[in-house]
Image (cartoon, grey):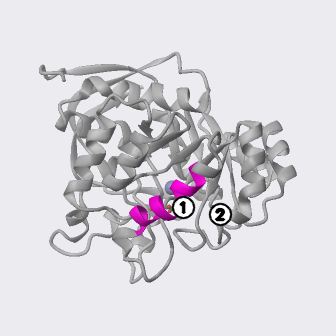
Amino acid sequence: MSTAAPQELVLTRPDDWHVHLRDEAALQSVVAHTAHQFARAIVMPNLRPPITTAAQAAAYRARILAALPEGSDFQPLMTLYLTDNTPVDEIKRAKDAGVVALKLYPAGATTNSDAGVTDIKKTYRTLEAMQREGLLLLVHGEVTDPAIDVFDREAVFVDQVMTPLRADMPELKVVFEHITTKEAAQYVAGADAYTAATLTPQHLLYNRNAIFTGGLRPHYYCLPVLKREEHRLALLQAATSGSNKFFLGTDSAPHASVMKENSVCGAGCFTALSALELYAEAFELAGALDKLEAFAAFNGPDFYGLPRNQGRVTLRRESWTLPDSVPFGEARLKPLRGGESIGWKFIP
Ligand code: DOR
Ligand code: ZN
């Protein structure tokens, strides 16, 4: 535990192990923000229609590269969207195309998840092929049964899906994405070396009161939804514990402000503008700034079996105000904490 309050932190260049970059004009608007802070990012495949084939992933990768600012060396790491029908053969093609993982969305769990998996058993032959080829499974860990309370869906998923899956597919590398509960944190901490988890800045900084402070605050609504304070504390403990099973994945998920500030608000917090700063704020609150570098730059590549980055970035203690909104194609996009101040400043 560090005691001094440093004015500057120099860290190995970090990666974002979970981001939504969208496509077309939206992609053009957001990709530079992620590329500014991160060397690499795991790009989620939940486009409409979803990225389900190696060929689609290669084409999407080319569109991302074309949308980058000149001179950027940002590397998108591509994923496929797992469906009930992902052919076993597609896994070899995906591997050859440089795809690193498949994403499991339980059907109906979140944004653009209608094509998701209805019963994980239907995907077992494909998961076996992934295990053989060394592709990872990235999991949105919520059950979708409408009878289960939305705040309980992750904990129920641990028992109903994650535990049997791990027993059936022990050498498949699994990332439990954007965990939000003490149950998931305990599960991952106690699992073997084939299981890890990503943590978002919003789940480390906020509990569910943030959604209801002085009125309904749509920009704090994401899925899995923010939980009680006891869960936030368990997540912060996991992130700052020094365990190499937990790493940075922002789940930055842009939705136009008009869609967020609407009678039906899409799920997603846009954090790409200030991602590392928000994590630094959370780690400092836990007195664990010394644990930030491994969380942001070592544990992810180590788990994926990829090299750590070479470069360095700086976080300076400096108060600045996040823009209230930024362009998003023809629309506007409001970052989490837009118009508010933040106490760290990222310097590439
Ligand atoms: O809040 C979320 N937004 N959670 C997800 O699982 C999907 C994401 C999105 O694509 O907007
Ligand atoms: Zn996501």
Q: Is mark 1 within 8 Å of ligand 1?
A: no
Measure the C-alpha gap from mark 2 to mark 1: 8 Å
Identify residue type, mark 2. Ile
204 magenta-colored:
no
Residue 23 location (% of width, % of height)? 64, 57
Ranked by sequence position, the earlier of labels 2 and 1 is 2
Mark 2 and 1 residues: CB-CB less than 8 Å, in contact?
Answer: yes
> What residue appears at the point 19 percent right and 75 percent down from the top-left corner?
215
Figure check: 60 above or below 116: above
Q: What's drawn in magenta, residue-wise?
A: 153-166
Q: Amino acid at mark 1?
A: Val
Position of residue 293 measured from the top left corner of the image (x, y, whole percent): 37, 25
Residue 43 vs residue 326, the one in the foreground: 43
Identify the residue shown where x is 65% and y is 57%: 24
* Residue 270: assigned label: none
The residue to which callout 1 is attached is: 161
Prevailing secondary structure class for the magenta stretch in the rendered image:
helix
Residue pointed to by mark 2: 120
- Residue 239: percent from left, percent from top: 33, 38
Q: Give the answer, above or below, for where 72 lies relative to 82.
A: above
Residue at 53% across, 45% down: 175
| Residue pictured at 24% horizontal, 38% vertical | 281
Q: Is residue 120 left or right of residue 319?
A: right
Q: Is residue 186 visible?
A: yes
